[in-house]
Image (cartoon, helix red, strand yellow):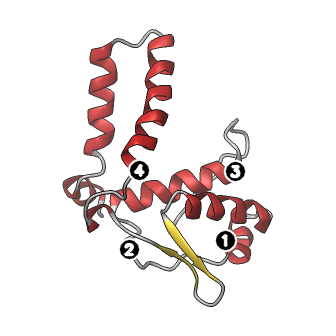
Amino acid sequence: MRLTLDVDSETPIYQQIRDQIVTAIATGDLPAETPLPSTRQLGADLAVNFHTVNKAYDLLRREGFIRVNRKSGAVVRRDPSSGPPEPGIADAWQERLRTLLAEAVAHGLTGDEVLRRSGDVLDSFTPEAAERKAP
């Protein structure tokens, strides 16, 4: 797993870690049952405090992306091909989407622009997109 952090970003480091792991799950780079590095190891690799990584892992756990076991560590819980989402996930996601769409509209993006960009991003998670980015 390769993560890139922007220390000058307004996005907190733990959120950057969380977002990149979710993206890796969505693209298939982190399939179900893939073990993640320990918080201490990932913290050392990224040159950040392990508590920052722990915060990202805790968020991922609460959101259902990973499971954490004291003995086996953090493991990817599921991948996109493992079936329909758990109950309530779609509704919670839609609430977050509402905020993102409100931001787009408030910044003046048109509905067509939002749909085009959304389609482009969604297409980037398809198996064909993964094949295109492979060396």
Residue topped by disc 2: 32
Residue topped by disc 3: 13
Locate the C terminus and report the quarter of the image it occupies: bottom left
Does the residue at mark 3 contact the one at mark 2 (Cβ under 8 Å)? no
> 10 Å neighbourhood of mark 3: few (<14), some, or many (≥20)?
some
| Amino acid tagged 4 | Ile
| Amino acid tagged 3 | Ile
Q: Residue 26: x, y in percent?
A: 37, 57
Which comes sooner in the sequence, label 1 or label 2? Answer: 2
Label 1 SS = helix
Q: Nearer the viewer, residue 3 or 85?
A: 85
Between the C-alphas of marks 3 and 1, the distance is 12 Å
Between the C-alphas of marks 1 and 2, the distance is 19 Å
Label 4 SS = helix
Which comes sooner in the sequence, label 1 or label 4? Answer: 1
Q: Residue 10: x, y in percent?
A: 70, 35
Which comes sooner in the sequence, label 4 or label 2? Answer: 2
Q: Residue 48: x, y in percent?
A: 77, 62
> 10 Å neighbourhood of mark 4: few (<14), some, or many (≥20)?
few
The picture quadrant where one finds residue 74 is bottom right
Please state if 10 lies on the left or on the right of 36 as rendered: right
- Which residue is at the far bottom? 71
